[in-house]
Structures are given as C-alpha cells and as structure tokens.
C-alpha cells in the first residue's frame, strides 16, 4: 500500500483511512454530509495526490496527444486545460484525463490513480512519433481547494489573481512561498476552486499554510467519500463506475469531448456510433420516493424487465433525495421519462432529469 506525502497529517487529523487505487487515502474526517456541505457553502481541501501525472514534451508532443485523445488539443493555448478521454480500439475508454498545455512542446496529462500503469503502457505503445514521456506521478502532490470561498481564502498565499482565473485555465507561480506551483482553476465538485500541483517535499508546509489561510473562512479537510457525493451531484463521470473499458464516450454522453475534426484511435467506429445512435445511454435520475440507488442495482421497466443498471448512486446531501447515473436501453431514455430502480425486492420509481442535479 502506497502512502501519499501527507498521510501522517491525515492520521493526526483523525481521518478514516482506506485503501484506494493502491494508496492509503482519507475517506472521511468529520463525516460525509458535514464535509459535503462545507464545500458547497464555504471551502474544503482534498488531498488527491494519488492521481497520476505524465509530462509529454518535444516537437511531436501534440501529435501523440492528438492520436490518443478524443478531444482536440490543437485548440489549446498556453495556460489552458482540457478535459478529454482516451478511447481504446474496441469502443471503450482507457481513461479520462485533463491535458494542460504549458507551451507548444510541453503538456501535462493528469490521469486516474487506478490507471497510472495502464495509461502509461497505452500511451507508450502508441508513441511511434518518439515524443518524450516522463512519469511524474511519484514526485508530485495535488491538493484540491474547492468551494465558493476558495479564491478569497487562498489569495494571501499567491501573487496570481485567483478571482480573475477562468475555468480550465492555469498559471505556474509562487504559492505558499513555494515556486513553480501549478495553480489550476479546475476541480471535481461544481463549487469552484483550484487544484494545486507541487513537489512532494513541499507538501507539509503547503498543507499547513492552506489550512491557516482558510481558517477564518471555515476551511475543513475533506475525504474521498464527500468528493464522490459532490461530483455525483454535478453528474461528473467516475472512471470504473460510469465509464470504463467497455463504455463508449458516445453512450456516456461525452460526445462534447469527442471531436471528429481530427483522427484519433477508433475515431471511425465512434463516428459511426454517433451517426447511428448508441444502443444504450447514460442517464441521470432522481428517485420519486425514499430510497438509495447503489452501483450495480438493476434498472427495470414497468413489466419488470431489466433495461439497464445503476453505475453511481447516493442520497444527495444537497437535495436530500436519492440520485444516480446508469446505462439504459436508448428506447427508454428521455428527460422526464420514468424508469424503476430495483432496490432489493422493490422497484422504486425514478424520473430521468437533466444534469447537473445540483443547480447551485
């Protein structure tokens, strides 16, 4: 089991630690609901240092990224980030990731912790153009400082104008006295904030300064459990649940990051799927009565026939109702249409809704 640089800090704070993607990670501190509301109303700090980071450099860096990525990275300018996925050759997804453009010949790819080795092997296999690849995953720590008060609370730690940063942009600057920190206006909560990338040896000092700067604003450490309820309220896909090696970006409603303006792995098959329409689609639903949908539960029609399955589900702390995502046969999908979630022996009625669940 790997430890992140701040593992002892989390234990000192009384975090409940659990194995996650090969790392010992904090799942909760005070409790999921309290942590969730703190991010929605104030701000919280997540240690997500288990994520993977690959540096791609050289004159063929963009060519490699364009081949493996469904989105069009040629649209990026320096200081911009882009959400994308890596399609496999069979219609599924190797991983979803964020691309950061440092300059025309230097990009940072941020990938999911559970997929670091798989992604590295996949990208290396397709690197026939000899771009330079460096795995920085073991060297970097990553804090997500999220919530409506994040910019105001963290401004004292940096010369970068945090309130002026646009969503999915980043700057490299001084933060908490440390130089060459990547300050990124990204996150997984839907409540605004930043993600901060820095060397492991700076982790303790940066954590302490972040907590001190946020003290008067109500900052709290937040675990992975609240990270999951926050992202689900926004309808953000989680790799391993809502997308994986068997789900296509088209059926996962990730057509907006699948650009057929260029060639990429399996582009032709995905283009055909988009034109013909997928046989199933990822839908968002709210339960019409009490209950909690869980991953793996069947979705059934009124006759009790299985028409899909739940991929993510929870009791929404903000909405105080059961919400979820799941794949459903296309003929049963549509906003406002009813489906049923099989919760133990009862088929519980649910309504398909537009994302996000949480409107803010």
Image (cartoon, rainbow, N blue to C red):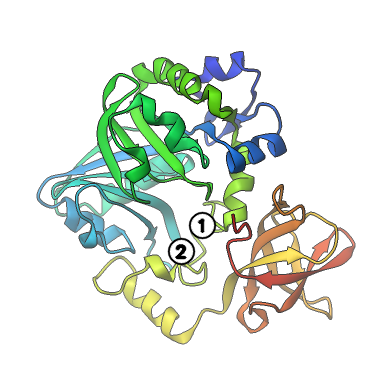
**Residues at circles 2 and 1 in contact by the CB criterion of under 8 Å:** yes
Name the residue at the right extreme. 345
Q: Residues within 10 Å of mark 2 (few under 14, many from 20)?
A: many
Q: Which comes sooner in the sequence, label 2 or label 1? A: 2
| Image position of 145 with respect to 257: above or below | above
Q: Residue 207 in the image: x percent, y percent?
A: 45, 21
Q: Which residue is mark 2?
A: 92
Against 161, residue 190 (above or below) is below
What secondary structure is marked by label 1? loop
What residue is at 60 percent from the left and 69 percent from the top?
Answer: 354
Residue 203, horizontal then vertical, whole percent: 40, 20
The reply, left or right, for residue 150 in relation to residue 242 is left
Q: Front-most of 35 and 297?
A: 35
Q: Is residue 142 above or below residue 78?
A: above
Element assignment for label 2: loop
The foreground one among 228 and 36 is 36
* 283 and 60: which is toward the camera: 283
Q: Position of residue 93 (x, y in %)?
A: 44, 60
Identified at 42% across, 71% down, the residue is 255
**Whole-percent x and y of residue 190?**
52, 50
Q: Is residue 49 visible?
A: no
Can I make out residue 351 in this image? yes
- In the picture, residue 199 is in which quadrant? top left
Considering the image in quadrants, where does the C terminus appear?
Answer: bottom right
Q: Which residue is mark 1?
A: 244
Q: CA distance from mark 2 to mark 1?
A: 6 Å
Q: Which residue occupies 17% across, 50% down?
A: 61
Please tell me which residue is depicted at 49% across the width and 18% down the height of the picture: 212
Q: Is residue 60 left or right of residue 69?
A: left
């Amino acid at each position: 089991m790997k430890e992140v640089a701040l593992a002892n800090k989390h234990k000192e704070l009384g975090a409940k630690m659990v194995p996650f993607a090969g790392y010992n990670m904090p799942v909760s501190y005070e409790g999921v609901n309290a942590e969730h509301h703190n991010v929605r109303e104030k701000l919280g700090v997540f240690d997500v240092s288990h994520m993977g980071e690959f540096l791609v450099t050289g004159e063929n860096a963009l060519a490699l990224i364009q081949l493996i990525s469904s989105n069009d990275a040629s649209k990026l300018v320096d200081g911009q980030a882009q959400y994308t996925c890596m399609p496999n050759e069979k219609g599924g997804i190797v991983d979803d990731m964020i691309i950061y453009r440092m300059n025309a010949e230097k990009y940072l790819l941020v990938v999911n912790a559970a997929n670091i080795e798989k992604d590295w092997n996949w990208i290396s296999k397709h690197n026939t153009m000899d771009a330079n690849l460096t795995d920085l995953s073991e060297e970097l720590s990553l804090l997500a400082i999220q919530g409506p008060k994040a910019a105001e609370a963290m401004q004292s730690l940096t010369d970068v104008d945090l309130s002026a940063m646009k969503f999915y942009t980043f700057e490299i600057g001084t933060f908490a006295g440390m130089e060459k920190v990547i300050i990124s206006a990204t996150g997984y909560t839907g409540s605004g904030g930043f993600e901060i990338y820095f060397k492991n040896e700076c982790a303790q000092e940066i954590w302490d300064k972040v907590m001190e700067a946020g003290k008067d604003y109500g900052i709290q450490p937040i675990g992975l459990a609240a990270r999951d309820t926050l992202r689900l309220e926004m309808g953000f896909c989680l790799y391993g649940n809502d997308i994986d090696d068997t789900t296509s970006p088209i059926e996962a409603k990730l057509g907006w990051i699948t650009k057929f303006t260029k060639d990429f792995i399996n582009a032709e098959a995905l283009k055909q799927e988009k034109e013909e329409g997928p046989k199933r689609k990822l839908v968002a639903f709210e339960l019409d009565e009490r209950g909690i949908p869980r991953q793996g539960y069947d979705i059934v029609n009124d006759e009790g026939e299985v028409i899909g399955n739940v991929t993510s589900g929870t009791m929404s702390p903000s909405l105080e109702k059961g919400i979820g995502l799941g794949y459903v046969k296309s003929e049963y999908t549509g906003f406002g249409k009813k489906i049923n979630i099989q919760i133990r022996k009862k088929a519980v009625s649910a309504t398909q809704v537009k994302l996000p669940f949480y409107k803010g």
